[in-house]
Image: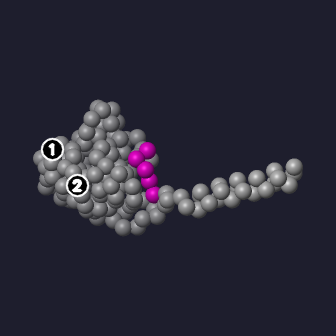
Amino acid sequence: MKRVLSRILVIVALLGGTAIAFEAPAYATESQCGSTSVCLWGEDDYSGCFRGMSTTKVDDYATIRWASPCTARIDNGANSVKNEGTSCSVRLYDGVNQSGSFILFNRELDGANFRDPYLANGGGTGSSSGQNWQDRISSHLFC
């Protein structure tokens, strides 16, 4: 009986190790966007490289890198966005220093238009809503 139980435990341990070995890279998920932040992902559906920023404004995304393990700059690299800001909406601009066209995302607390898993589909509101915003964002400003 001990021998059978021992073999079962070994099999369970091996299966557990296999599940971990084949797990996808742990970049980020939508749930990892922290309160008070605007979060960007490098891929659709809140996947790939990730960066959350609670700073009221960032003038030039060319100075900001994705969170580890990614090392590239986030400028013109976002494909998904979520606003977890608690006090106001966020404007995402296609130019540095909050210039050019923008799209706006409400706070999550507002219950609508606070995220977009696929920026190519024209989500958000603002001067350029309805346009493809994939790989286009260069700065932001919380209102």
Residue at the image point whose x is 33% and y is 55% from the top? 44
Q: Which residue is mark 1?
A: 126
In percent of width and height, residue 70 lies at: 42, 65
Image side of residue 45 versus residue 59, left or right: right
Of residue 131 and residue 72, the one placed in the foreground of this image is 131
Q: Secondary structure at mark 2?
A: helix
Mark carried by residue 100: none
Magenta span main SS: loop
Of residue 55 and residue 123, the one placed in the foreground of this image is 123
Residue segment shown in magenta: 27-31
10 Å neighbourhood of mark 1: few (<14), some, or many (≥20)? some
- Going by the numbered disc 2, the residue's amino acid type is Ala
Residue at the image point whose x is 29% and y is 40% from the top? 114
Q: Is residue 56 visible?
A: no
Image side of residue 80 versus residue 15, left or right: left
Q: Are the residues tagged 1 and 2 within 8 Å (C-beta)?
A: no
User: Which of the 4 image quadrants contains residue 100?
Assistant: bottom left
Mark carried by residue 120: 2
